[in-house]
Image: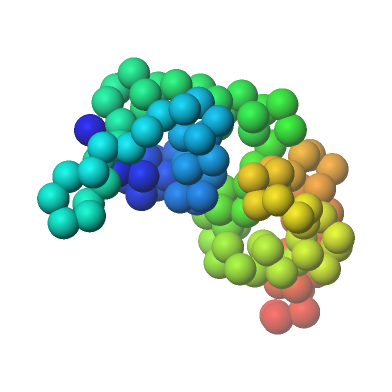
Amino acid sequence: MKTITELAKKLGVSNTAVRYWMERLEIHPVTIGAGRTVVFDNDQEDLIKKRVIIFQKTNGGMNPTQLSRKYGVSRQTIWNIASGLGLILGNHQKNVFDKEAIAKIEEKLNVNSEKDN
């Protein structure tokens, strides 16, 4: 069994994204001990993983966490760039960037790194 944080780390998404899919899939957490939440058995984990992957592929791509890992910058850096480009949507779950948006972010990262040299 995994906690929300463990599954989020494994999938490269935020805790909020895992909670979002838990709610959509009507998966209810099991609380153990002093507030530690153990949530998933293997079937539930697989179901959430499939939904996250399908959602990202359908939307073309990568979320801020995945981009930050790919480029070795902070998630906040990606978020700031995307926000400056007008790519951030109101609902956190919708912030999966398609190929065009990723290209714009990459361009901005390259410009920033050239200025730093």
| Residue 95 x, y percent position in the rendering | 70, 48
| Residue 71 x, y percent position in the rendering | 60, 57
Report the residue at 64% width, 33% height from top: 56
Vertical placement of 112 versus 39: above or below?
below
Disc tally is 0
Res 108 visible = yes
Vertical placement of 22 versus 113: above or below?
above
Quarter of the picture holding the C terminus: bottom right
Q: Is residue 112 left or right of residue 10?
A: right
For residue 1, which quarter of the picture?
A: top left
| Residue 89 x, y percent position in the rendering | 78, 53
For residue 96, which quarter of the picture?
A: top right
| Residue 28 x, y percent position in the rendering | 37, 33
Report the residue at 65% width, 52% height from top: 92
Residue lying farthest to the top in this orientation? 43
Report the residue at 37% width, 27% height from top: 45
- Looking at the picture, the colour scheme in use is rainbow
Residue nearest the viewer, comparing 54 with 3: 3
Res 13 visible = no
Residue nearest the viewer, comparing 10 with 31: 31
Vertical placement of 26 versus 3: above or below?
above
Q: Is residue 21 left or right of residue 29?
A: right
Residue nearest the viewer, comparing 94 with 102: 94
Residue nearest the viewer, comparing 92 with 50: 92
Vertical placement of 40 versus 90: above or below?
above
